[in-house]
Amino acid sequence: MDDSKNFDEKVLKLKKALQTFQSRRLNTTYHDLRQKPEYKNIAYFFFQKLYGPEDYEFRNTSMQTLHKAMDGRAPGGMIDAVSMVIELHDLSDDLDNRMVEAMIASGVETDMNMAQYQSIYRQLDNYDERIGQIELSLKVTRVFYALSRRWVVRLSLGTIRRVAHLLGIGKIMDFVYEGYTAFRVIHNIDYFIETIEKREKAWHSEIMKDAN
């Protein structure tokens, strides 16, 4: 029992370290976007809140509860968008879990460096899934940006936030609202999305190129 508990604790620590590593990498790669007033808030939300290690499991579980709570209280587009976020979380979680398994097998600890990260990435050989994760992330971004332009969404959010707090998931609704307000100040989402798509696909392709 103690060995099992220790193993679970090790997995949790490695997963948090992995997510911290990935979040830092994203913040470094998109430092220029974070300096632009128009993208500052969405870059923080996207690279720190959405992919960061803070309360990752809580976000994933609460997002599913929120999805049920929204039924009949929100426009269909919002429900579909939350469904996409759940799909993205599930995919990201699965990819992270496989990375952690490979970290354990390779003896990589919480102080993982870039060379170790890229080595494990190549071992897993799931480039297509990584590209799928990027494309789904961008699709989610476009959908939420479009929703942020609709006045009916702004009105619905007030009702949903009240219900969410009554259900004890107000924190996740505040998380969603933070993303919504970050999108509201953006005038040109295309530049943000195209920059991410170009850099992420190039970064992942470069890792796999080194495997040949």
Image (cartoon, rainbow, N blue to C red):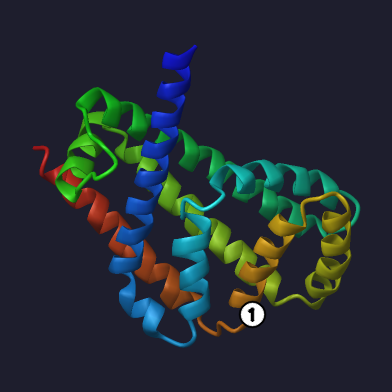
Asked if residue 61 lies left or right of residue 54, the reply is: right
- Residue 42, placed above or below residue 103: below
Q: What amino acid is found at the position of numbered circle 1 in the picture?
A: Arg
Residue 123 percent across, percent down from the top left: 22, 30
* Residue 179 sits in quarter: bottom right
Residue 101, given in percent of the width and then of the height, sits at: 34, 26
Q: Is residue 184 above or below residue 7?
A: below
Residue 124: quadrant of the picture: top left
Quarter holding residue 172:
bottom right
Callout 1: SS: helix
Residue in view at x 68 percent, y 73 percent? 148
In the image, taking residue 12 as reference, residue 206 lies left or right, namely left
The residue positioned 12% from the left and 38% from the top of the image is 211
- Residue that badge 1 annotates: 184
Residue 47 position (above or below residue 110)? below
Position of 125 with respect to 181 (left or right) is: left
